[in-house]
Amino acid sequence: MAMSGRHASRDDGFETWIDRYQEAGRVRHVALSTLRTRSYKLRWFARWCEERDIQGPVEVDRATLETYQRWLFHYRKTDGQPLKVETQFQRLSTLCGFFHWLTEQGVLPHNPASLLQLPRLPKKLPASVLCLEEVEHIMEQPLLETPVGLRDRAMMEVLFSTGIRRQELVGLRVTDLDLEGGTLWIRMGKGGVQRRIPIGNRALVWLEKYLQEGRIHHLKGPLDEGWMFLNVLGGPLSKVSVTERLRSYITKAGIEKPGACHIFRHTMATLMLEGGADIRYIQEMLGHVSLNTTQIYTRVSPVHLKEVHNRTHPAAKLTRED
C-alpha cells in the first residue's frame, strides 16, 4: 500500500507538513474556521496512516488513498450510522488540496491524489422556501413596543432583503451600513470573502428605526464596540440565539417549514429569480464563489422553469385545438 523506500523521518512526518500547510494557509489569509476544519480532517487521516505504519506523506501513494476512501465508506459511527457522502467527499477533497500543495512545494515527485475519483454528491434542493404571504406573517410576530422586538424585526428584514448568512448577520457593525447609498458591507463573509451588496428601502427603514430607538437600550456603559445587533448585555448576538429567536417567530406564525435564518436566504434568492433577476446577480448577492452553487435555485423555482419552458419549447405555444 505504501511507497517503497525509507520510512519518513520526524521532519518528514505528517505533523510537520500539516503544520507547514496550515502556515501557508494563514499567509494567504484563509479563514480561521477553514483552517481548523482542515487541520481536523488532515490529522484524522494522519492517525489512520500511522496505525498502518505509514509515517509521512512521502509514503502515501494512490493505493493508500483508495484504501482510505473505502475505509471511509465502510466506517460506522458510535450510533452505527455511516458517514454522509458529503462528509466522505470533504475528507477526501481536503487530502487532494494537501497533496497538491506538497507536490507544488517539491516534497513529492508527483501527486498521489491527482487521479483519485471523489464520491458523487447528491444534488440537494434548499430545505424550504417561504411565499411572500408567509414572510409578511412572520414579520408581524415581534413585539415592536420593545427594543428586542425592534431588533428582531430589523434582523429579519435584513435577512430577507439581502439573503446574507447568519454568521454575516451577527458580524455586522453599524459602520457597515450605508443608509444614503442603500448598501451593506459584508466584511465577515464565508471564506474571508468581502462584498458590498444593496439593501432594500423597507429594510433600511427598519434598521434606522432600530438604531435610533432600540439599539441604544442595549448599550451598557460608555464603551460602544459598534456591533449592529446587540444582546441585552450589550455584546454581539450569538449565532445560536439568532436561530432560536427567528425559529420562535416562524413557529408562532404557524408555519411548519424547517429552517430559521437560511430560510430567508433561500426565499430571497428564489423570489428574485422568479422576478427575473439574472442568476449571476443572485450569485453576487449570496456571496457564492461558484455559479454552480447558485444554480440550485433554478431547480427549486417552478415558476422560473415554467417561464423558461413557455419561452423556449415549441409545444408550449400550442393550443388545445392544435
Image: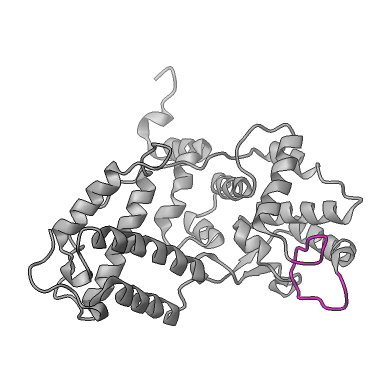
Q: Which residues are magenta?
A: 220-235
The residue at the point 56 percent across, 60 percent down is: 285
Name the foreground residue: 205 vs 257.
257
Whether residue 177 is situated above or below residue 85 in the rendered picture:
below
Name the foreground residue: 137 vs 66.
66
Q: Position of residue 234 (x, y in %)?
A: 81, 66
- Tell me the quarter of the picture where residue 46 sits: bottom left
The residue at the point 48 percent across, 60 percent down is: 288
- Can I make out residue 116 in this image? no
The residue at the point 39 percent across, 43 percent down is: 77
Q: Is residue 230 magenta?
A: yes
Secondary structure that dominates the magenta span: loop
Quarter of the image for the C terminus: give it: top left
Q: Residue furthest top?
A: 321
Instruction: Classify residue 261 as left or right of residue 177.
Output: left
Name the foreground residue: 206 vs 200.
206
Whether residue 278 is situated above or below residue 14 in the rendered picture:
above
Name the foreground residue: 267 vs 1.
1
Whether residue 16 is situated above or below residue 228 in the rendered picture:
below
- Can I make out residue 284 in this image? yes
Instruction: Classify residue 248 as left or right of residue 210.
Output: left
Q: Is residue 196 magenta?
A: no
Instruction: Classify residue 227 as left or right of residue 162.
Output: right
Q: Position of residue 160 (x, y in %)?
A: 67, 51
Q: Residue furthest right?
A: 145
- Tell me the quarter of the picture where residue 217 sits: bottom right
Q: Position of residue 54 (x, y in %)?
A: 20, 64
